Image (cartoon, helix red, strand yellow):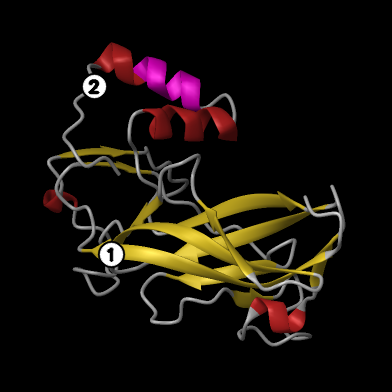
Amino acid sequence: VFKRPLVLARKRLAIMNATVASSQSAYSKWFLERGGVTANQGIIDITVAGNEKAPVTITSMQIVKHCQSPLLSGTLFYSPTTGSGPFPTIRMYFDLDDQVSVGQFLPATNPSATVAGGNYFTRRVVGLRLHESATFVLYVTTQSHYCSFNFQMTVVPFGQPAVTEKISDNGKPFELTSDGENQITTGKGVVFRAYQVVYRSEERRVGK
């Protein structure tokens, strides 16, 4: 989703399609460099490393968010997927529509074996020695808002008071918006007329 109208001539649209089709990273880069905002759900990989001589323990991660009505007046690039299937790794879950700000535990491929929910760090102890690293996979969703947000990670160095580390998107907030599908249509699909410009992927049907 773009906050402003973005009109592409046929030739520019063809170039864009060729560019974003080359890889997932090229797809993301094209939109993000032009101010695009991911819709509905996003996955953020964050890698942290210990920089203290003594071990440190990560005890919490919270989201600090500023939310408002979803971006429904600019430009929508609509290309729905059929779903990503089971999560291959354990993830930390943040629902931007919820009042809970602490990262929740989200199991991997076998959700029946481990119940989802609850503070992620009550399920997993994360300690780091000097230069040791850990990667968190953060799954963030919204069905009703546009939000800008950062994360705050609580770290306890051995024998010292807890400190808070801010995690941003290279110095600026992360962004996520609902595309309006569940906000204004009660689950019946996106109302394209809410946007000034819509680019919709071609649907191919087989049979009658």
Q: Nearer the viewer, mark 1 or mark 2?
A: 1
User: For the point 17% across and 42% down, which residue is it?
Assistant: 74
The amino acid sitting under disc 2 is: Leu
Q: Residues within 10 Å of mark 2 (few under 14, many from 20)?
A: few
Q: Earlier in the sequence, mark 1 or mark 2?
A: 2
User: For the point 26% across and 40% down, which residue is it?
Assistant: 2
Say if 81 sits above or below 95 in the image.
above
Tag 1 residue: 67
Residue 15: in magenta span: yes
**Residue 11 placed where, x, y %?**
30, 12
Question: Which segment did they paint magenta?
Answer: 14-20
**Residue 202 placed where, x, y %?**
37, 37
**Residue 150 placed where, x, y %?**
45, 57
Among the 4 quarters of the image, the one containing residue 13 = top left
User: For the point 75% across and 70% down, which residue is it?
Assistant: 109
Among the 4 quarters of the image, the one containing residue 22 = top right
Tag 2 residue: 8
Q: How many numbered discs? A: 2
Q: Is there CB contact under 8 Å for labels 1 and 2?
A: no
Q: Nearer the viewer, residue 34 or 80?
A: 34
Q: Nearer the viewer, residue 14 or 88?
A: 88
**Residue 45 placed where, x, y %?**
63, 51
The Cα atoms of the two marked residues, 1 and 2, are separated by 29 Å
Instruction: List the single residue furthest toward the top.
Output: 11
Among the 4 quarters of the image, the one containing residue 9 = top left
- Quarter of the image with the N terminus is top left
The amino acid sitting under disc 1 is: Cys
* SS at circle 2: loop
Question: Does 74 sit left or right of 177 as displayed?
Answer: left
